[in-house]
Image: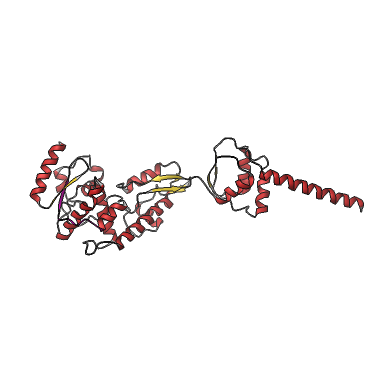
Amino acid sequence: MRTLKRLIFYILMMAVLFAGWLYLHVHSDVSLPEIPYEFTIESGSNLKQVSQQLADAGVLVHPWSLIMLSRYMGNESAIKAGDYKLTGDISQVALLEYLIKGDVSQTEVKFLEGWTFAQIRNILNQHPDIQNNTSDLSEQEILQLIGAEETAAEGLFFPDTYYFVKGGSDVEILRRAYLTMQAHLHSTWDARQESLPIDTPYDALILASIIEKETGLESDRAEIAGVFINRLRIGMRLQTDPTIIYGMGDRFDGNLRKKDLQTDQAYNTYTRAGLPPTPIAMPGLSSIQAALNPAETKAIYFVAKGNGESQFSTNLADHNRAVNKYQRQQK
């Protein structure tokens, strides 16, 4: 009996000593190979794999200690995948909380106003941190994946900076950009001017894309929108070069010729009345707002001055004089 008591006593003492050592160990700072120290937890990794990964890198001396700590805290399966950056001393307790919180470092991709869907796809396919799940898909297949009801992708994605964890899918980025555009478009649609010659939010998106490509100066945006609204009201053709250039696609060599204006195609707003069938680019919020809240103006013509500004005219004679003046200056 006395031997058994001694054995129990030694076991309890060892357990207390081990618990004390473990407490001090997990509350002591880990050893970082460098500062800042960056590492990645791959999707699907479990805590045992992550602990061994950190031990192999020299961060943990005993990988099992992090596993025991997580079991004690009841968070063994709560770690999150992603890219992490440690910028200073950190204990195992704080490290585990960091992995559970999933406070990962993020990267970004930017979509710019006036970009086409082809440019968006190109930047997504070239981004080294994006998982390309759409590179072999058709436009319609992509729209189906992101839950869009439209049949053409052009103009449907909001220009902005999108942050994501390294290895994020291009599908998710496109879905976010699409939903963001829908939110902006419909909120602006609800606050639109009355009696506009625009029937649907999609029509507004088409017009906004034209305004985006025609605007050289922010202060001219609403008045350019007013010109196009005036033309739609009186049944005048929009006669805007960016739509023709878009419709020409790869055939456009940088010079728009008279024959291009006269050659009929779906996006030729010199030969066809009304709006083109789809947007021609990705409009920003300012262009959407201008399309649905245009300036009050009597102008139905405008020409670029060559310095970013536009000259507006209410009649063809004045417009022709402005064209001759500013085209001569540009030449």
Q: Is residue 266 visible from the viewing direction of this image?
A: no
Quadrant in which the C terminus is drawn: top left
Q: Toward the viewer: 263 or 270?
A: 270
Q: Position of residue 263 (x, y in %)?
A: 16, 48
Quadrant in which the N terminus is drawn: bottom right
Q: Which residues are magenta?
A: 293-304
- In this view, the residue farthest toward the right is 2
Q: Position of residue 298 (x, y in %)?
A: 14, 56
Quarter where residue 217 is shown: top left
Q: Position of residue 173 (x, y in %)?
A: 42, 50
Q: Toward the viewer: 298 or 185?
A: 298
Determine whether, in the image, residue 13 is placed left or right of residue 23.
Answer: right
- In this view, the residue farthest toward the bottom is 195
Majority SS type along the magenta span: loop
Determine whether, in the image, residue 304 is placed left or right of residue 138.
Answer: left
Quick check: is 298 in the magenta stretch? yes
Q: How many marks?
A: 0
Q: Is residue 6 visible from the viewing direction of this image?
A: yes
Quarter where residue 192 is shown: bottom left
